[in-house]
Amino acid sequence: MITKGIRGAITVEENTSEAIGSATIKLLKEIMERNNIETNLISHAIFTLTPDLNADFPAKYARINLKWKDVAMMCFNEIEVPNALKMCLRVLVVVNCSESFEPEFVYLEGAENLRK
């Protein structure tokens, strides 16, 4: 078994705990569904938020709502790049998998523009 990363991003409507939580759950559920992964296969997750999102920690919502209690998670600020997408939450979910696993990256809401 090896590990591979699955990238994802979503824009958040406003800088509130509720909006960050809702966006986090929506993004993580979509990543898990599209990649057909179970929580026990997740090694760790790294979240970043643009500087305009600081109302809450996305990892909290994964831990509470998705039961990621045994998943190591960290949250960081995204670097501030001029003209970069604002109000954006990004994640790197690292999973234990077979070599043949082909991750599908997930970009939702305004973050879809990151991969056009």
Image (spheres, helix red, strand yellow):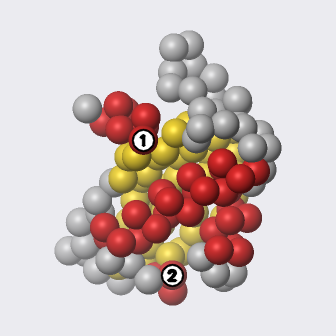
Residue positioned 66% across, 49% down in the render: 20
Residue 63 vertical placement versus 58 (above, below): below
Residue positioned 58% across, 41% down in the render: 12
What quarter of the picture does the N terminus occupy?
bottom left
Q: Provide residue 10's location: percent of width, then percent of height.
A: 49, 45
What quarter of the picture does the C terminus occupy?
top left
Horizontal side of 28 relative to 59 (left or right) equals left
Report the Cα–Cα distance between label 1 and label 2: 24 Å
Q: Is residue 65 visible?
A: yes
Q: Is residue 71 visible?
A: no
Of callouts 1 and 2, the N-terminal one:
2
Horizontal side of 66 relative to 52 (left or right) equals left
* Residue labelled with disc 1: 109
Q: Which of the numbered marks, if any, corresponds to residue 39?
A: 2
Residue 18 vertical placement versus 41 (above, below): above
Q: Residues within 10 Å of mark 2 (few under 14, many from 20)?
A: some
Residue 112 vertical placement versus 81 (above, below): below
Residue positioned 53% across, 74% down in the render: 43
Label 2 is placed on what type of residue? Answer: Thr
Q: Provide residue 76's location: percent of width, then percent of height.
A: 69, 45
Q: Provide residue 6's location: percent of width, then percent of height.
A: 40, 59
Q: Secondary structure at mark 1?
A: helix
Residue 81 vertical placement versus 49 (above, below): above
Label 1 is placed on what type of residue? Answer: Glu
